[in-house]
Amino acid sequence: MSKKLTKRSEDYSKWYNELVVKADLAENSGVRGCMVIKPYGYAIWEKMQAELDRMFKETGHQNAYFPLFIPKSYFSKEASHVDGFAKECAVVTHYRLKNDENGKVVVDETAKLEEELIVRPTSETIIWDTYRKWVQSYRDLPLLINQWANVVRWEMRTRLFLRTTEFLWQEGHTAHATKQEALEEAERMQGIYADFAENFMAIPVIKGTKTEGERFAGALETYCIEALMQDGKALQAGTSHFLGQNFAKAFDVKFATKEGKQEYVWATSWGVSTRLMGALVMTHSDDNGLVLPPNLAPIQVVMVPIYKSEEQLEAISEKADEITKELRDLGISVKYDNRTTHKPGWKFAEYELKGVPLRIAIGPRDLENNVVELARRDNLTKQVINQEGLAVVIKKMLTQIQIDLYQKALNFRDSHITKVDTFAEFEEVLETKGGFVLAHWDGTSETEEQIKNKTKATIRCIPNSPIFEEGKCVFSGKVSTKRVLFAKAY
């Protein structure tokens, strides 16, 4: 397969799809709308998982696992929840196959389930049915549970990582004695997601709340983090929901207070998914391939030997082993690619495509001069570095690459937040520049829907630190007290 990619400026969507496949992150499977995550892609997801899991546990959360199948009757207990997911549900109706008279495998019509099972699109209902048995008293609270799982949402138009019928995620589900505790939990998790996005993914995000029309089905408040991709479209990178007592009442989850009164618990749920892989690709990568932030790169440093004889390879390998040990002692992941089946130039192109942050090239002359050639993936610069103290130099350089990637993305994001006061300006910015549009909104779902139908732009969030000022709604002209963020989005 050719490693050359379509340019972002020519066809951003095609560039993204090609890059995900050519960089060995994922591919489409034999099941329509479902993907195979390949080892390199999964290694990045595992690093994301490990960091998030650590952050969850440091804030008192524990992991558990709940069933993939949910009885259909559970969904009818929370009306807005079922309305939100009804069109995306996969339903299991039978439990057996058989061979017909022609030897074809068919569904055994006699093996019909008494009650259909939903393949989980999200787990609130099965979890809250379980929590009824776990929560009796104030001593059982707060209940802070997270689940790493797969979910199924039947999608008609799919794209690798960004929107697939089955995807991987984590979903936190917590129960609290008071409304205030639950609100604090929802806000805390929004903060954790923002911290992860900025410090590990090197993606700047805007924290805010969703409008009523954009909230999670069954939530009273949805907190979100919004990121901006290089094509000027927004991507929701994580959500945290304050669910009030809706699910507690639907599934009768009560607790005895210190005073002996029976009260319903207060709930939250929160999650991020493999969609973050799409965000990572689209925020940093270029026309040469992936650009990975060092904090999430499966391979942070790759070493490629340049040689003509077995004897030269042997001498280079001896030095490479020393460098490898020094790097690993500093907690740096390193790969020494001494395959004899591929030429150095091919390897350089391969690791550039895969976004490995730093590449070391070392040949016979470098051995003599006690140096190596060090190439940065993010800015494609090269320099000759002394082998003495190389590991320390590399550690500092990896830290700098992480900072530089974040700063570059931040500069791009900040230069694509445009304040507008008229609808003509609003439409012009969306068509010519893209990015976030900061505009007045009258607070009605009717106006929000009309803007969406006319421009395909949605309110991404009401920022946590909104700009309060008297103004007029960009669309209706009605009085408005603050600006909100609009954008076209994935």
Image: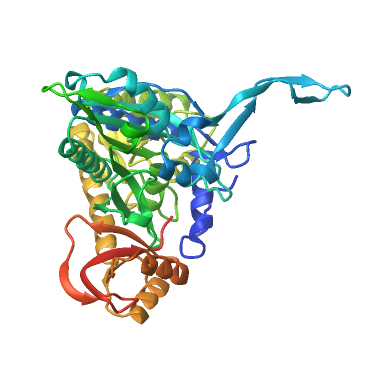
Q: Residue furthest front?
A: 261
Across and down, in percent, residue 154 comes to 55, 42
- Picture quarter containing residue 274? top left
Q: Residue furthest right?
A: 102
Q: Which residue corresponds to the image point at 36% horizontal and 28% vertical from the top-left? A: 128
30 vs 39, left or right, is right
Q: Which residue corresponds to the image point at 39% horizontal and 45% vertical from the top-left? A: 217
Residue 40 visible somewhere in the drawing: no
Q: Is residue 246 above or below residue 286?
A: above
Q: Residue furthest left?
A: 259
Across and down, in percent, residue 163 comes to 49, 46
Q: Is residue 84 above or below residue 126?
A: below
Quadrant in which the N terminus is drawn: top right
Q: Is residue 213 above or below residue 64?
A: below
116 vs 207, left or right, is right
Name the foreground residue: 347 vs 24. 24
Residue 146 visible somewhere in the drawing: yes
Q: How is the image coloured?
A: rainbow
- Picture quarter containing residue 387? top left
364 vs 331, left or right, is right
Quadrant in which the C terminus is drawn: bottom left
Q: Is residue 122 above or below residue 408?
A: above
Across and down, in percent, residue 335 comes to 37, 29
Q: Which residue corresponds to the image point at 45% horizontal and 46% vertical from the top-left? A: 84
Question: How many numbered discs, if any?
Answer: 0
Across and down, in percent, residue 209 comes to 26, 53
Name the foreground residue: 86 vs 407. 86
Name the foreground residue: 252 vs 23. 252
